[in-house]
Amino acid sequence: MFQISKQNEIARKNLCEKMSHITSLEQSIALLPDSENNIPKLEAANEKCRAKIRKLEVQWQQHKEQLISKHSDLLASSGHKLVCKSLS
């Protein structure tokens, strides 16, 4: 019973992925007839996505630096505590 349920879930996921792909293709085809107006819109949307990715990269780097710093501090403090315990 569990295996049938798992197979149904996998089949459902595959179907959803295929339907999403078909929807994407349909939307792309709908844009073709009015390409003169749609190309600038798509380029603007693309640039907006690129800007968002750049912003997220900067945010990630800041977050990553904070995590590395915190990790280094924790390593240093745990090393210090181990030295103190061994002296006791």
Image (cartoon, rainbow, N blue to C red):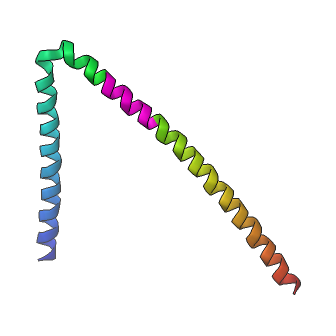
Query: Which stretch appears magenta?
Result: 44-53
Rendered residue at 79%/77% (across/down): 82
Q: Is residue 76 above or below residue 58?
A: below
The residue furthest top is 36
Whether the magenta-drawn stretch holds residue 19 is answered as: no
Measured from the top left, where is residue 55 in percent x and y? 48, 37
Of residues 17 and 33, the one nearer the viewer is 33
Location of residue 7 by image quarter: bottom left
Rendered residue at 53%/46% (across/down): 60
Q: Main secondary structure of the magenta part?
A: helix
Location of residue 67 by image quarter: bottom right
Of residues 87 and 8, the one nearer the viewer is 87
Measured from the top left, where is residue 48 in percent x and y? 37, 30
Of residues 12 and 59, the one nearer the viewer is 59
Q: Is residue 15 left or right of residue 52?
A: left
Measured from the top left, where is residue 42 in percent x and y? 27, 24
Q: Is residue 30 above or below residue 57?
A: above
Q: Is residue 87 left or right of residue 44?
A: right
Location of residue 53 by image quarter: top left
